[in-house]
Each structure stands twice: as C-alpha cells, then as structure tokens.
Image: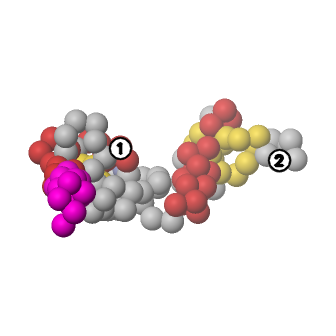
Amino acid sequence: MSKCTTCSKECLTSDFHESPNKKGHTAQCKACRSEVYFKNKYGLPCVSCHLFKRLETNSLCRDCNNEVGLRCCIRCREWLPVLVEFYENRNECKACYKGKQVLQTLAKIDQKYGV
Ligand SMILES: [Zn+2]
Ligand SMILES: [Zn+2]
Ligand SMILES: [Zn+2]
C-alpha cells in the first residue's frame, strides 16, 4: 500500500501508474492523475455531474444531456427536449424543420409563378 500525495488515500500499488523512470510508481494515484489530466484538458466541470468532461454549449456533458433528454438544434442552436421538440433522429427542431419546409414551398411557388 502507498499513500497518494493528492487525495491522501492509501492505495494499492496497482492503483498507481509506473513512474517515468521505472523506479516505483508516481506520487499520485491513477484517479487523481486522470482528474488533473481532464481538468487541464477541459477546464470546467459539467454543471450537473461535476465531472471534467467535454461539455456541450449548455455547460452539460453529453451524458447528462442524454439523461435529461436535451438536444441542440443545429439551426437555431437552442437546447430543447428531444421528445417534444424534435422529430425522431433529426438534428433540427420541429420549428426549424417546418420553417425550412415553408421556405422550400415558397421557393417552389416563386419558380412556378415567377413572382
Ligand atoms: Zn489520489
Ligand atoms: Zn455531466
Ligand atoms: Zn431549431
């Protein structure tokens, strides 16, 4: 057993990475090292699960967004409930999808009547 210098927990030797010079192991356990790594990489934790992960534009990680059923519309960039505001498997919300269809219909009318 060895003591981690960061969390002060007694950890098994297998909970540490081998140190770079191959003598013994690193001073921090694997959990602490990966937390530091992700902290440096992502900067801010997810506002819901408080883990350092890649965050979506609403400050939640992908997992948390999936859990609460939110999806970002690729057009209006709004975070909306998937079940209510999206057609299945579409990346744009119903409002944007309908809006696009209206524009397409108008364009067709324009072509047809040369307005
Ligand atoms: Zn530790
Ligand atoms: Zn999260
Ligand atoms: Zn939208």
For residue 46, what is the image quadrant? bottom left
For disc 1, does the CB lie below 8 Å from ligand 2?
yes
Give the residue at x 58% y 63%: 40
Quarter of the image where the C terminus is located: bottom left
Q: Judging from the image, what secondary structure is the residue with disc 2 in?
A: loop
* Of the pair 80 and 31, the residue shown nearer to us: 80
Location of mark 1 (residue): 63
Q: Label 2: few (<14), some or many (≥20) within 10 Å?
A: few
Which one is earlier in the sequence, the residue at label 2 or at label 1? 2
* Of the pair 69 and 45, the residue shown nearer to us: 69
**Closer mark to the observer between disc 2 and disc 1:** 1
Q: Which amino acid does label 1 sit on?
A: Asp
Above or below residue 115? Residue 14 is: above
Judge from the rendering whether residue 56 lies leftward or rightward of residue 95; answer left or right. Answer: right
Judge from the rendering whether residue 44 lies leftward or rightward of residue 59; answer left or right. Answer: right
Quarter of the image where the N terminus is located: top right
Q: What secondary structure prevails in the magenta region?
A: helix
* Of the pair 107 and 34, the residue shown nearer to us: 107
Give the residue at x 61% y 44%: 30
Res. 24 mark: none
**Spatial distance from mark 2 to mark 1, Cα to Cα?**
33 Å
Q: Judging from the image, what secondary structure is the residue with disc 1 in?
A: helix
Where residue 87 sits in the image (x, y, percent)? 19, 40
Whether residue 48 can be seen here:
no
Judge from the rendering whether residue 3 lies leftward or rightward of residue 49; answer left or right. Answer: right
For residue 77, what is the image quadrant? bottom left
Q: What residue type is labelled 2?
A: Pro
Whether residue 23 can be seen here:
yes
Q: Give the range drawn in magenta.
A: 101-115
Location of mark 2 (residue): 20
Give the residue at x 62% y 37%: 15
